[in-house]
Image: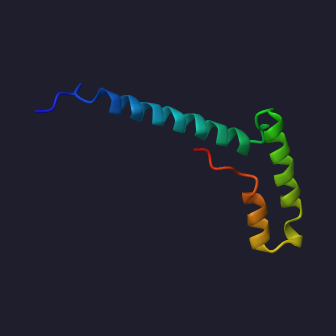
Amino acid sequence: MLNSSSHPTIWKFINALQKEEQVNRMKIEQYVAGMEPPSKKIYKDRSAKIKKICLDYDNRTIEDYLRGIAHNFQLQI
């Protein structure tokens, strides 16, 4: 028979993941609603680059458009 307290760290981990998901969903909704991204310079610079790429959409192939957008994202490990 399993004791409900035999794996307390997995439940803490799951709760932490759920909280992180809630925070990220809230941030996404704020961005969709037009709120400004965080005020760090790097985010402002990336935002300006992405906006420039989006405004030039008609002059790019879809591959170049997507590649341009992708260059402005980093995988956070």
Position of 63 compared to 18: left or right? right
For this orientation, the residue located farthest to the front is 77
Q: Position of residue 52 (x, y in %)?
A: 88, 56
Q: Position of residue 46 (x, y in %)?
A: 81, 47
Quarter holding residue 39: top right
The colour scheme used to paint the residues is rainbow
Q: Position of residue 67 (x, y in %)?
A: 75, 65
What residue appears at the point 68 percent right and 49 percent down from the top-left corner?
Answer: 74
Position of 22 compared to 54: left or right? left
For this orientation, the residue located farthest to the top is 5
Q: Is residue 69 above or below residue 32?
A: below
Quarter holding residue 13: top left
- For the N terminus, the image quarter is top left
Position of 46 compared to 18: left or right? right
What residue appears at the point 62 percent right and 36 percent down from the top-left corner?
Answer: 26
Residue toward you, 29 or 65: 65
What residue appears at the point 59 percent right and 40 percent down from the top-left corner?
Answer: 25
